[in-house]
Image (tube, coloured by chain):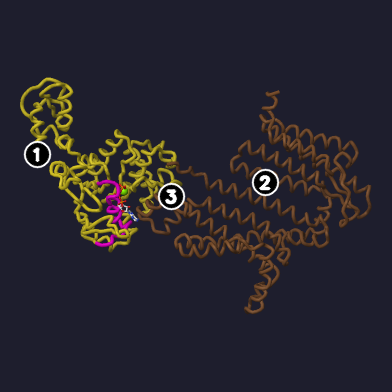
Amino acid sequence: MIEIDQITKTYGTVNAVDAVSMTVETGSITVIVGTSGSGKTTLLRMINRLEEPTSGEVRINGTSTSTVKPHLLRRRIGYAIQGHGLFPHHTVARNIGAVPELLKWSRDEINARVDELLALFSMDPAEFRDRFPAELSGGQQQRVGVARALASRPDLLLMDEPFGALDPIIRTRAQEDLRHIQRKLGSTIMLVTHDMEEAISLGDRVAVMDGGKLVQYAPPAEIISRPATDFVANMVGDVERPLRLLSLISVAEIIEPGEADGEALPETASLRDALSACLWTGCDALPATRGGTVVGRVTLKAIRARAGAHE
Amino acid sequence: MMGIRTHLSPPGLLFAILGLAALLAPFMTLAANRIVAGDGIVAWRVAGPAITVPGVAAVMIGLAMGLVATWTRLRLLGAVFGLAGLLWLLSRSAPILLTQAGEYARVSPAAGFWCLLVIFMLLMADALAALKPGPFMRAVLLFAVLAALVLVLHSGLLSDLSVLQEFSSRRDAFFTEFQRHLGLAFGSLAAAALIGFPLGILCHHRAGLQGATLPVLSFLQTIPSLAMFGLMIPILGWVGNTVPGAQAIGIAGIGFAPAFLALLLYSLLPVVGNTVAGLAATPPAALEAARGMGMTPRQRLLRVELPLGLPIILTGLRIVLVQNIGLAVIAGLIGGGGFGTFVFQGLNQTATDLILLGALPTVVLALTAAILMDTLVELTRRIPEETA
Ligand SMILES: Nc1ncnc2c1ncn2[C@@H]1O[C@H](COP(=O)(O)OP(=O)(O)OP(=O)(O)O)[C@@H](O)[C@H]1O
Ligand SMILES: [Mg+2]
């Protein structure tokens, strides 16, 4: 558990981060979202003490970070820097293996881990292992940067706009991969983005920052249905709010008995997908399947009811 | 007409024109003794036709081969051919010229020879550059050229030339001063590196220290070299006389110590300045990532900053080495030894050959050092540059 307690960072007269308090549960993904200059990076960097807070403190599992030597603290925390910050003079393999090397893993262990991570990010180890960062595309550089942060299997992972340079398709894939890895390893992730869409689809909880202040810290559904301030509502986008909400609910929740014609939807699809399919095919109802067999149907009416439920 | 013109190498054309002009200049000088000025003799008069015709022809064919733009290897061959022609003319004519003259007579290469030598070396460099040899290949080529030079000098082919006569009468002194020269240049380089690296690293971390150090070192750099060597005499003389034990370890107003110190002072700015610049060239994001993953300041320095700054740091050492090989000549003036000893003796006696005995090896040494250091810098630059 990470407790951020009244943490403030002042540059000159400006509070880049202003008395932020929040608690992050172990094994969850927290996404910090906000406009440019709202203090997201600064907040993140105070957790691994790249920036010393002007006041307040951070406790990891009850221990204040100020009692640990900074470099030892940082070796336990994965950090994917905004941009990618790869070492231009080291190969991809050495970049990814940097923290394990600091932690004195054996050569074989490091090599195995490097190949495992490259494969995980859909980069053929044989092809990419010995390349230099300059010989990669921007998206590949960024994936290597994230792989480097994951290398030593840290319990806590700080990621500063890790998917910024990826195209939408790879981005969705990378988000799914990250989710998958996180679920498997049970790691705690704090991720910074300025993309509300990403925050909602990825976060167990979303922290919205504005001008250094934490304006709302809640699960995605709550952020959408009950934005704390106009700023949050703006970030979510009023018009799309029902759609965003639907994208968080799966078909399984509203399956009702009955039959329908048309292309079947798996129960794991979101209501947003279901709505889209209904509109596209012109049907009022579509069959829903579980494990390939039809178990009922989804109706436009039910979808509409859920979309309005929070109003 | 257009077709032919496009096949001409522009530098080759320039070399050919300059080379033909140089052929008209005196090729060798014959003097009655080592002090007086001699008479110049053009290339086709240095000996009988049996010697001059093939020699001059080789030079002209070499120049002509250098004209072909499309065939680099032919140009390279032309340079070798021309150089062989020069060597032939020089080695064959020297004994003949001497037998016709008096007992103390001296022959030496004259302006025409030196110009042609430079022209063929430039032609060779031009052709080699077009072949783009890798760093290792360049080192190999350098050693091949040096080996050829040593072989020619050792063979006695040129032993009738006045410079080599000066050499043979001073063989032991030559090698002593050679060692001294290397000692001065490399010793001061090593000392400058020993002081300059830590100082540069400190400056990198403390802006205040950097602000104080670099201007002082820059000021030292602006002191004219003769003045600097002159200044060392009273300063070290005073130290030698007042500090107990100083004289025992060789600290005195004249000799090795003041020359060494003067060179060291000149070396500090390039070493410290380039160390600071090299360390500052690290991409900020890479440094930030290094900090973020828990590297200690020492690990950041050794694993990130130094390797990334190495080409710039080595460039500083290259500047120092080449500069000190040249400057060490002035050590001869204050009894510091080195090739400067011959230069200044020669100046005193107005014996040009003696001056050359000091100057020529200095030039060869400086060129060799420059090429080797360039190769080294390039090897450390092999990492692809960041494009993002
Ligand atoms: N070292 C610094 N010195 C002075 N001001 C700083 C410093 N670092 C950040 N700031 C200021 O603090 C504020 C917050 O910066 P921060 O980098 O945390 O923003 P961010 O939310 O990460 O923005 P972005 O989305 O553009 O990355 C900005 O106004 C910035 O100008
Ligand atoms: Mg930021």
> Residue tagged by mark 2?
B143
Specify whether A49 is left or right of B236.
Answer: left
Report x, y in % for residue A82. 34, 47
Do tag 1 and tag 2 residues touch (Cβ < 8 Å)? no
Magenta range: A34-55
Q: CA distance from mark 3 to mark 1?
A: 50 Å
Shade of chain A as shown in the rendered figure: yellow
Report x, y in % for residue A51. 32, 57
Q: Looking at the colours in the rendered structure, which chain would you say is drawn in brown?
A: B
Residue at the left extreme, as displayed: A257
Specify whether A177 is left or right of B223.
Answer: left
Q: Which mark is residue A311?
A: 1
Q: Residue at x 51, y 52 (%)?
A: B310
> Residue tagged by mark 3?
B283
Would you say the beta carbon of the disc 3 residue lies within 8 angstroms of ligand 1? no
Specify whether B142 is left or right of A255.
Answer: right
Q: CA distance from mark 3 to mark 2?
A: 37 Å
Indicate the secondary structure of the residue bearing disc 3: loop
Q: CA distance from mark 1 to mark 2?
A: 85 Å
Q: Quadrant of the C terminus of chain A?
A: top left
> Are both tags, 3 and 2, on one chain?
yes
Would you say the beta carbon of the disc 1 residue lies within 8 angstroms of ligand 1? no
Chain letter behind tag 1: A
Q: Residue at x 9, y 22 (%)?
A: A260
Q: Residue at x 67, y 41 (%)?
A: B125
Indicate the secondary structure of the residue bearing disc 2: helix
Q: Amino acid at mark 1?
A: Glu
Q: Choose top left, top right, bottom left or bottom right for residue B91.
A: top right
Do tag 3 and tag 2 residues touch (Cβ < 8 Å)? no
